[in-house]
Image (tube, grey):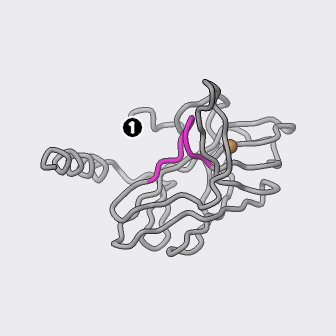
Amino acid sequence: MRRCFLRAAAAAAFVSALPAAAHDYRAGDIAIGHPWTRAIGAAAPTAAGYMSLRNAGTEPDRLVGASSPRARSVEIHEMTMTDGVMRMRPLGAGIAIPPGGTAWLRPSGTHLMLIGPAGPFARGEAVPVTLRFERAGEVTIELEVAAAGAREAAGHGGH
Ligand SMILES: [Cu+2]
């Protein structure tokens, strides 16, 4: 128990020591870190959105929905391994963010899926997305467009 506590404290200290990036956002107690997506062409059927969701409050919250003027719809997806094949499926109940905890949306994991994106998304461009939280309400953020095939947001390779 003690060891876990110390590790969590060290992680928190590390995160707070990082300079605040220009594209961090806040909705109530929820801090949204480094939202990003990848460059796509005009005909791409989908695009994925990634970010961190940190709950600085004392009550659990949940990301329950999202929308974007640059996509027909936005779903919350998770990746699952079935018979050795990675598949994704909608998370109907959304993403839980426990008090003091962080939910990570990242490649090969939970992500936002932009269905029918109005592409192209060019590298360096900002794609607006409105996030809807159960407690914290709505906030509009911008996904920073990284290179096609990027595994991390531009400029955040050191995280
Ligand atoms: Cu997906």
Compared with residue 56, is residue 143 higher up or lower down, i.e. above or below? above
* Three-letter code, disc 1: His
Return the residue at label 1: 159
Residue at coordinates 44% horizontally, 51% vertically from top-left? 21
Residue 65 in the image: x percent, y percent? 65, 64
- Examine the rendered structure and indicate whether residue 31 appears above or below residue 146: below
Is residue 107 within the magenta segment? Answer: yes
When asked about the image quadrant of residue 89, the answer is: top right
Residue reaching furthest to the right = 43
Residue most toward the front? 83
Q: Quadrant of the C terminus?
A: top left
Residue 20: x and y, percent?
39, 54
Q: Which residues are magenta?
A: 103-111
* Label 1 residue SS: loop
Q: Residue furthest top?
A: 84
Residue 147: x and y, percent? 64, 32
**Res 43 → quadrant:** top right
On whether residue 134 falls in the magenta region, the answer is no
Q: Residue at x 59, y 37 (%)?
A: 80
Ligand 1: which quarter?
top right
Task: Indicate the position of residue 31 as horizontal and vertical percent values.
Answer: 44, 62
| 43 relative position to 80: left or right | right
Judge left or right: residue 77 versus residue 1.
right
What residue appears at the point 32 percent right and 48 percent down from the top-left corner? 18
